[in-house]
Image: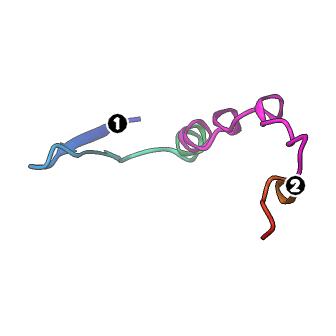
Amino acid sequence: MPYKDVTYDNGFTERYYYDETDDEQALRMSRMNSVAKFPSANHRPLPRQTPLFYLVDII
């Protein structure tokens, strides 16, 4: 999976892949777009015990 890194004047580096087979491209895409990068459902915040409308002072 050959690639070429291009660094611009502002410091941004971009990687270009070339001469990839279909299998190599599929592997690279699956690694870049992996579902494992999303937070787990176990790490979601707990629901609020007190609804917000009870916290607002009504004038």
**x 65%, y 38%: residue:** 34
First in sequence: mark 1 or mark 2?
Answer: 1
**Which circle, 1 or 2, is nearer the viewer?**
2
Residue that label 1 marks: 2
Residue 31 in the magenta stretch? The answer is: yes
Judge left or right: residue 33 versus residue 9: right
Q: Is residue 40 above or below residue 23?
A: above
- Amino acid type of disc 2? Tyr
Q: Which of 9 and 28 is in front in this view?
A: 9
Q: Which mark is residue 28?
A: none
Left or right, 58 with reference to 5:
right
Residue 54: within the magenta?
no
The residue positioned 80% from the left and 53% from the top of the image is 55
Tag 1–tag 2 contact (CB < 8 Å): no
**Residue 57 occupies quadrant:** bottom right
User: Of residues 59 and 30, which is closer to you in this image?
Assistant: 59
Location of the C terminus by quadrant is bottom right
